[in-house]
Image (cartoon, helix red, strand yellow):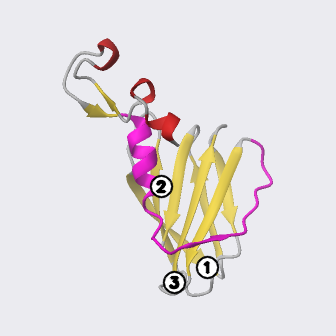
Amino acid sequence: MQRQLTSDYSVLTGGGIYGTPGPLKSTQRFWNLKQLGLTPGGSFNLPIKCDRPNISCVAYGDIKDGIYTVHIVNNGAKREVTLTGLPGNVKALNMYITDEHHGMDKIKSVRVSNGKAQFTLDSACFTTLIN
């Protein structure tokens, strides 16, 4: 992680950093790290698998408080997704995305029915779903 927080791969740009003019502003890296921070402390890694190329995912559960978080990186084209195996008490998931146009923006709420959620992943984005 240390190598990812060096000035040549910074969470900030502008202010003269590597010759970039203008005021300091957050980079996509900043928003990616902040979005990962949505995962509640004390969460446990949960098993998850994906059957499509160019998608990576990880799931966490704070079982005590009933909070579940799924992080998905889509390195491919826009696509429809079906997420299954969610606990029965989860009725909706808030969707956040970071890409070249969004910085941890809450896009919408995704309905969960019978442990299943269906939604669209934008191309080349980092998406987080959390209840």
Which residue shows up at 30% across the image and 20% down it? 17
Q: Marks 3 and 1, Cα distance to the nearest angstrom?
A: 16 Å
Q: In this figure, which residue is indicated by the disc labeled 2?
A: 36
Question: Helix, strand, or loop for circle 2?
Answer: helix
Whole-percent x and y of residue 34?
39, 51
Read off the magenta span: 27-53
Quarter of the rendering containing residue 117: bottom right
In reply to whether residue 3 is colored magenta, the answer given is no
Q: In this figure, which residue is indicated by the disc labeled 3?
A: 66
Which residue shows up at 66% across the image and 82% down it? 114
Q: Which mark is residue 37?
A: none
Task: Report the side of 108 relative to 119 (left or right).
Answer: left
Q: Marks 2 and 1, Cα distance to the nearest angstrom?
A: 25 Å
For badge 3, the amino acid type reads: Gly
Task: For label 1, count other residues whose C-alpha is less than 10 Å away and answer few (under 14), some (14-19) or many (20+).
Answer: some
Mark before the other along the chain sequence, 3 or 2:
2
Is residue 23 placed above or below 60 in the rendered structure? Answer: above
Question: Helix, strand, or loop for circle 1?
Answer: strand
Is residue 7 placed above or below 94 in the rendered structure? Answer: above
For badge 2, the amino acid type reads: Leu
In reply to whether residue 48 is colored magenta, the answer given is yes
Q: In this figure, which residue is indicated by the disc labeled 1?
A: 113
Quarter of the rendering containing residue 85: bottom right
